[in-house]
Image (cartoon, grey):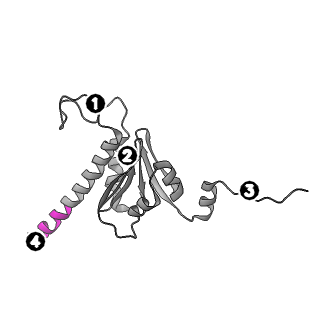
């Protein structure tokens, strides 16, 4: 007598069908970028970030600007920049947000570089004379910080330009 067993769908299939818990993410590595729909469990598995740390990235929740360093990832929540940086990839939630356009472009252009090209030549930057390139995580974090600084700079210029009128 054969029992009637229910075989669950693989997690990604179930999420794709129901849409529950999945969201659009941009994944950028040295080899290129792609837009994918991932659920929280998939992100936690891929990045090693806990569910509590993922809450920092929720735009609906008011968290102060934060950079969390974890064993396998760096969680960044600065102004409108939200990302999870691992040793090989950067995960950006909601990459189609118009406020992220320049940040996404910077990530794609500056991180998806051919391995032969060094992001900093030995004669420039604070490590002048050091021939080792920065690790992927530091380059990604640097792009996040540059983007936030550029946004804050432009916000400071706007009231100044208005007051000159």
Residue closest to the eye, 99 or 121: 121
Q: Residue at x 43, y 38 (%)?
A: 31
Q: How far from the left and from the top, in percent, is residue 67?
A: 31, 55
- Residue indicated by mark 1: 132
Please report whichever mark, 2 or 1, sits nearer to the chain's N-terminal start. 2
Please report whichever mark, 4 or 1, sits nearer to the chain's N-terminal start. 1
- Residue indicated by mark 3: 7
Residue closest to the eye, 58 or 143: 58
| Distance between the alpha carbons at the discs numbered 3 and 1 | 51 Å
Q: Are marks 3 and 2 in contact (CB under 8 Å)?
A: no
Q: Is residue 130 above or below residue 91?
A: above
Q: In this rendering, would 112 be left or right of 157?
A: right
Q: Secondary structure at mark 4?
A: helix
Which of the 4 quarters of the picture holds residue 79?
bottom left
Q: Residue at x 53, y 56 (%)?
A: 41
Q: Secondary structure at mark 3?
A: loop
| Distance between the alpha carbons at the discs numbered 2 and 1 | 22 Å
């Amino acid at each position: 007598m054969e029992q009637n067993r229910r075989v669950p769908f693989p997690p990604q299939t179930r999420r794709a069908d129901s849409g529950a818990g999945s969201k659009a993410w941009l994944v950028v590595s040295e080899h290129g970028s792609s837009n994918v729909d991932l659920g929280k469990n998939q992100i936690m598995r891929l990045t090693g970030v806990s569910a509590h740390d993922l809450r920092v990235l929720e735009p609906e929740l008011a968290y102060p600007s934060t950079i969390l360093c974890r064993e396998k990832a760096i969680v960044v929540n600065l102004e409108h920049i939200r990302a999870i940086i691992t040793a090989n990839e950067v995960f950006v939630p909601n990459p189609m947000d118009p406020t992220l356009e320049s940040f996404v472009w910077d990530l794609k252009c500056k991180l998806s570089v051919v391995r032969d090209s060094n992001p900093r030549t030995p004669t420039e930057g604070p490590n002048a004379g050091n021939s080792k390139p920065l690790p992927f995580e530091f380059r990604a974090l640097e792009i996040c910080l540059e983007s936030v600084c550029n946004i804050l700079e432009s916000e400071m210029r706007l009231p100044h330009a208005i007051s000159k009128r």
